[in-house]
């Protein structure tokens, strides 16, 4: 089974093309047509008015992390360290503690994610056996003026809600 | 020397010193917004003072303030600090004084005395431009060399070799122009171009010497280190070329020098090939005679043009997304009112021209102003060509650049000289 | 008055540049002082209302030739420790001055013995492009052509010399 070969026509060998000037003027006409179109009506620019108009984030998009909860609001995470072990960027650090509410034997006492080190690969989500960590908050813009603020802890991870309904999640959310 | 003499000298020196400086802002603005529009994006348009964006011009002020307050540092490894500091100023100064010989209006006759409208009235005209642009290469060489930086050195090597080799086709292209005009004086050249060829084509250098125009424009692009000849600062291979080590105001001076050089060489191209300050079909004498009809037509034309311009502002200066009480609409209304105010002032001045005695000194001043405006409009269009080419053509490879200079442009320019001189001798 | 001030300024600058050329150790600094000399010489030509020579001095000497020299210096990338150690250079300097002073005294005497002559500004077109061109191509055509032939010979010689090396390789 031979690969499909498409022969491209070589340009640039005819006399007119070798003079360059004609081709240069053709190119300049092309760029000028863009300029005039945009100058006449600048609503035709291919731009997003970003801070005012937020982009639509699809459900599969990996945003900032959150920890999911049981229906009664307790943390699903059992501190199995799967995500921490899997993390290629080494940005998750969990401290485990004993759990007394009969849901599991362990629970995280502290769960820190350093967002400056995170590469948003989603391996933690894949690794989690209990669907306890997700990246479906839809938060894509993280700004602050000190580094400490980017290390987020258990409280923040638990309180951030997911941005998408459960059926989108089933179709393949992060 | 009467008071008027001193005033006229002040005017012409101020014009040739400050207009290039003012045009830096216009050039940068045109370059950045133009680049945006060429590439279907908006360009810088967010910087605003109380919500007034002035179509992005405020960004220039913001950039200027930023560069002014940035830390101006000289790395420790730079040994020749004197040359390092001097280099950007050489580039800037050479660019400014190369504009000084360009006439921006015909000789203004007031009270029986002629006033030359040229920064430094010099007979050698175009030769001065050649000499001074040759000097600006020292700034680039010194910058690259004293930076003690491989990228800087490579950039300035490229730039120096490029400027030296393109000065030759440029000079030779000029020679054929000089044969046609029979003078090196730029004012006389501009006056010559006020005539008509076969009675209906303006006798511009571009029509008399198209080959020379092509060679000169290409060489001028190379002299200004503009794309497609900006190998000296090719970002992809040399980071920023000769000004890698420069920061803050020293970088800004380089940057401004580049734009002033662009302005000056546009002005020279205009003066040599596109009739300088001449309005096509209306030379100075005709303008003075027909000052009143011209003023009358301008009075009619201005409001019509302004009406469409206002419509354009109103259409384009709005937020292109749903927004309550769009502040950009009020902004547009303010702009439109300002422009209408300007139009009213110009109309009043034109009425003054209509009332004044024809052929008097008012008519002369009016014609000079009209020619200055023509000159500036033409130069702006030429600068636009520079920008247009920059955002169309990719950069040359270095051997292609030298090949173009020595193997294409140089023989072409020589051939052009022979043909031109043969034709001139045959005709005379 | 204004012209005299300019003359003194240009003369002083050209001598300072020449002194700098001799005294600076680094070749780049020397070349830059030579440029100062060239430009002030051009200024002196302009004061003599020799416009064409003024601009040719600027284009050819201060512009083209010096930029080639500086280009080469930049190419060599000379550091301070590449420069030869010149011991006793002040001794040489003193010796040179001692030799030159009598000659200079003699020259000054010769110049002074020339009868004083009031310099007048020659007609407006003196030294312009057209005037020099007319003189050059009418009265001095043969010498001009001979000089240009000489330059052509030098040019071809340079090409031949440069080409020979490549052939040997």
Image: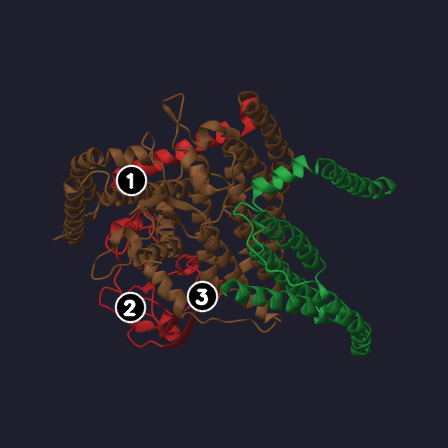
Chain colours: A red, B brown, C green
Q: Against A62, is B381 above or below?
A: above
Q: What is the CA distance from the residue labelled 3 to the residue labelled 2?
A: 50 Å
Q: Are marks 3 and 2 on the same chain?
A: no
The one of B8 and C139 positioned closer to us in this rendering: C139
**Pointer 2 residue:** A158
| Residue A40 rendering spot, x and y as whole percentages | 26, 37
Q: Residue at x 50, y 38 (%)?
A: B217
Total marks drawn?
3
Q: Residue at x 29, y 40 (%)?
A: A39
Q: Secondary structure at mark 2?
A: helix
**Pointer 1 residue:** A39
The one of B134 and B304 positioned closer to us in this rendering: B134
Q: Tell me the quadrant of the picture where the N terminus of chain B can be found.
A: bottom left
| Residue B105 rendering spot, x and y as whole percentages | 36, 44
**Pointer 3 residue:** B249
Badge 1 crowding class, 10 Å Cα cut-off, few under 14, some 14 to 19, many 20 or more, is some
Q: What is the CA distance from the residue labelled 1 to the residue labelled 3?
A: 33 Å
Q: Are the two marked residues, 3 and 2, in contact with CB atoms closer than 8 angstroms?
A: no
Q: Secondary structure at mark 1?
A: helix
Mark 1 or 2: the one toward you: 1
Q: Against A125, is C151 above or below?
A: above
The one of A15 and B416 positioned closer to us in this rendering: B416
Q: Are the two marked residues, 1 and 2, in contact with CB atoms closer than 8 angstroms?
A: no
Chain for numbered disc 3: B
Q: From the viewer's perspective, tell me whether residue B124 is left or right of residue C165.
A: left
Q: Are marks 1 and 2 on the same chain?
A: yes
- What's the mark number on residue C98? none
């Amino acid at each position: 089974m031979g690969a499909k070969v498409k022969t491209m026509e070589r340009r640039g060998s005819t006399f007119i093309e070798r003079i360059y000037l004609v081709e240069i003027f053709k190119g300049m006409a092309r760029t000028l047509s863009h300029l005039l179109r945009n100058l006449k009506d600048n609503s035709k620019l291919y731009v997003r008015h970003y801070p005012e108009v937020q982009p639509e984030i699809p459900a599969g998009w990996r945003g900032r992390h959150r920890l999911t909860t049981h229906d009664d609001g307790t943390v699903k995470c059992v501190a199995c360290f799967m995500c921490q072990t899997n993390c290629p960027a080494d940005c998750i650090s969990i401290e485990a503690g004993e759990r007394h509410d009969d849901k599991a034997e362990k629970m995280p006492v502290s769960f820190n994610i350093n967002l400056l080190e995170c590469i948003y690969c989603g391996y933690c989500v894949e690794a989690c056996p209990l669907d306890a960590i997700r990246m479906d908050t839809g938060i894509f813009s993280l700004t602050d003026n000190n580094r400490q603020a980017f290390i987020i802890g258990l409280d923040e991870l638990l309180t951030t809600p997911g941005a998408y309904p459960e059926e989108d999640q089933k179709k393949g959310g992060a | 020397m009467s008071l008027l003499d001193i005033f006229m000298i002040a005017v012409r020196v101020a014009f040739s010193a400050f207009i290039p400086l003012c045009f830096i802002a216009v050039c940068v603005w045109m370059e950045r917004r133009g680049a945006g529009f060429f590439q279907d994006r908006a360009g810088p348009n967010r910087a605003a003072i109380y919500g007034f964006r002035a179509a992005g011009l405020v960004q220039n002020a913001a950039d200027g303030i930023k560069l002014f307050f940035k830390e101006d540092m000289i790395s420790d490894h730079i040994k020749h600090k004197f040359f390092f500091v001097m280099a950007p100023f050489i580039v800037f100064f050479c660019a400014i004084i190369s504009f000084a010989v360009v006439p921006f209006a015909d000789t203004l006759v007031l009270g029986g005395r002629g006033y030359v409208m040229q920064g430094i009235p010099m007979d050698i005209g175009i030769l001065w431009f050649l000499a001074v642009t040759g000097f600006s290469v020292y700034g680039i060489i010194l910058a690259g060399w004293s930076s003690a930086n491989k990228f800087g050195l490579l950039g300035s090597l490229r730039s120096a070799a490029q400027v030296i080799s393109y000065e030759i086709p440029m000079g030779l292209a000029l020679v054929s122009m000089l044969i046609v005009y029979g003078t090196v004086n730029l004012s006389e050249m501009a006056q010559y171009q006020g005539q008509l060829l076969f009675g209906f084509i303006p006798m511009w250098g571009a029509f008399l010497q198209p080959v020379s125009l092509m060679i000169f424009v290409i060489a001028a692009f190379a002299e200004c280190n503009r794309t497609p000849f900006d190998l000296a600062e090719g970002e992809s291979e040399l980071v920023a070329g000769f000004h890698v080590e420069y920061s803050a105001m020293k970088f800004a001076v380089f940057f401004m020098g580049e734009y002033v050089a662009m302005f000056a060489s546009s002005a020279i191209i205009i003066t040599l090939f596109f009739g300088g300050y001449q309005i096509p079909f209306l030379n100075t004498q005709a303008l003075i005679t027909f000052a009143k009809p011209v003023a009358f037509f301008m009075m009619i034309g201005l409001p019509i043009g302004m009406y469409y311009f206002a419509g354009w502002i109103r259409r384009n200066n709005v937020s292109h997304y749903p927004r309550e009480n769009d502040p950009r609409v009020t902004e547009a209304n303010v702009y439109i009112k300002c422009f209408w105010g300007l139009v009213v002032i110009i109309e009043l001045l034109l009425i003054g021209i209509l009332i004044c005695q024809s052929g008097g000194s008012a008519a002369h001043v009016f014609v000079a102003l009209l020619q200055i405006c023509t000159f500036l409009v033409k130069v702006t269009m030429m600068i636009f060509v520079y920008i247009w080419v920059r955002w169309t053509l990719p950069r040359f490879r270095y051997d292609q650049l030298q090949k173009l200079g020595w193997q294409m442009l140089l023989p072409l320019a020589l051939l052009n000289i022979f043909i031109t001189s043969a034709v001139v001798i045959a005709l005379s | 008055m204004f012209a005299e001030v300019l003359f003194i300024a240009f003369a002083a600058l050209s001598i300072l540049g020449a002194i700098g050329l001799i005294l600076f150790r680094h070749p780049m600094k020397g070349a830059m002082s030579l440029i100062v000399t060239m430009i002030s010489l051009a200024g002196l030509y302009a004061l003599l209302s020799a416009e064409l020579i003024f601009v040719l001095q600027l284009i050819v000497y201060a512009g083209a030739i010096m930029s080639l020299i500086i280009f080469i210096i930049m190419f060599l990338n000379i550091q301070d420790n590449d420069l030869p150690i010149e011991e006793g250079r002040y001794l040489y300097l003193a010796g040179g001055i001692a030799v030159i002073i009598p000659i200079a005294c003699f020259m000054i005497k010769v110049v002074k013995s020339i009868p004083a002559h009031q310099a007048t500004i020659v007609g407006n077109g003196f030294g312009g492009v057209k005037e020099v061109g007319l003189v050059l191509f009418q009265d001095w055509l043969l010498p001009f052509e001979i000089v240009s032939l000489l330059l052509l010979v030098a040019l071809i010689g340079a090409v031949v010399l440069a080409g020979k090396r490549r052939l040997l390789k």
